[in-house]
Amino acid sequence: MVAITLENVSKYFGETVANYQVNLQVTDGEFLVILGPSGCGKTTALRLIAGLEQPSEGAIYFDDDRVDGRSPSARNIAMVFQNYALYPHMTVAENIGYPLKVRGFSPDERDEKVEDVTSLLHIEDQVEKKPGALSGGQRQRVALARAIVREPTVFLLDEPLSNLDAKLRQEMRSELKRLQNELEITTVYVTHNQEEAMSMSDRVAVMNQGTVQQVAPPQELYDRPRTAWVAQFIGSPPMNLFQGTRRNGSIDLGEAGTVDLSGVLEAKEAVVETSERDDVQSTALLASDTQGTVSLGIRPENLTLASTPPPSGNVIEGRVDTVEPMGEYILVNVSVNDQIVNAKVSDRTVSRGDRVYLTFDTNDAYVYDTNGDLVA
Ligand code: ATP
């Protein structure tokens, strides 16, 4: 087990100076998922850790050992990709034993290790088969077995489940998590799939445009997205953000209404100031500057719909655009100031075209400043 540190790592590809600047720490034995949209730089981060790419600037450490500049083979890492790349002419046992063979392990040692790892992945009865005779899920298990058989100190996975169907993907998620728990290998897993990230990780690193936006345990990421970008990326559908003008304790949303957040703003600002001083750079500024353009964030599950204006509390006015029954809940899209807002509700009490009043508990509201940083 090792801890991995990427310190001010930037990467330029040829003439293109991409905005790629990554600081990231993966702790000993941790399962860290790098999550982000296509092209944000997830695979590049993994390839930098593996040694398949070298940083243009910055340093990479495995514990206190500086590894950038070293080849992949000098790092004791194992990688599994979306495409499993098994040797078609070899049996499962030969495929799994191959990394040991090239490292000079004796046939007996190989057999013993292959037996251990096939039993760990529940593929003992497949060892004599060729990859062509296996299902997608079984091939994925063989690829995992081959990666872990030589006991790497770092396990790197790049979208390893994306070629599997939905049911199998779900099964393999739990399997991978179990495997990582048992082996306690420091693991970095790249995906653009939120469910995968949230269900498997100890912590999630959210990337956007070559930078890490936030690193946090899944629940914290959901409960306290530090930037408006993360807030709009996490959740299904993600958080609604209403543009408004802050006037001391209130947020003016134009025709949709005014939301009074006094008390909540003050209380949350105090918490942010004491607990996240280093993270939220704009806190000091906002404590004194109580005016300006802000975004009010409310998750779809925290909005309640009413057909008549409620007598008290915060109300945002809008018109129903679409009503989508999702089985578990009903998703209502409401047009507010020309913006579509998602509300997850349990009863179908409204129809397209209805004027509706959205209410919420102020404790469920988030406020982001002009730069998109969390204020409260
Ligand atoms: P995806 O989810 O689509 O695989 P990603 O988040 O893994 O995307 P990367 O593959 O790391 O993203 O790519 C990040 C950026 O760097 C992209 O703009 C990509 O075009 C660029 N890039 C990556 N590798 C190279 C390369 N070898 N040469 C030039 N540009 C590259």
Image (spheres, rainbow, N blue to C red):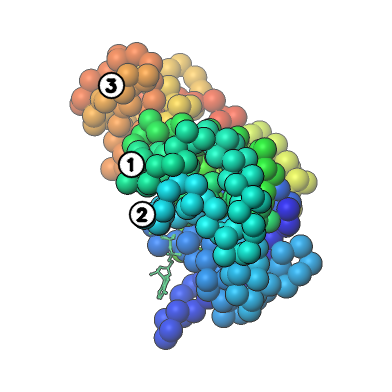
Q: Is residue 78 visible?
A: yes
Upstream in the sequence, badge 3 or badge 2? 2
* Residue type beneath disc 3: Pro
- In the picture of the structure, the residue carrying the numbered disc 2 is 88
State the CA–CA distance, disc 3 to disc 2. 46 Å
The CB of the residue at mark 3 lies under 8 Å from ligand 1: no
Most foreground residue, 349 or 202: 202
Identify which residue is drawn at 68% across, 72% down: 67
* Residue type beneath disc 2: Pro
Residues packed near mark 1 inside 10 Å, few (<14), some (14 to 19) or many (20 plus):
few
Q: Of all residues shown, which one is farthest toward the left?
A: 353
Q: Position of residue 82 (x, y in %)?
A: 41, 52
Upstream in the sequence, badge 2 or badge 1? 2
State the CA–CA distance, disc 2 to disc 1. 10 Å
* Residue type beneath disc 1: Ala
The answer to whether the residue labelled 1 contacts the one labelled 3, judged by CB atoms less than 8 Å apart, is no
Q: Of all residues shown, which one is farthest toward the bottom?
A: 15
Disc 1 versus disc 3: nearer the observer: 1
Q: Please determine whether, in this image, residue 92 is positioned above or below residue 322.
A: below
Identify which residue is drawn at 27% across, 18% down: 350
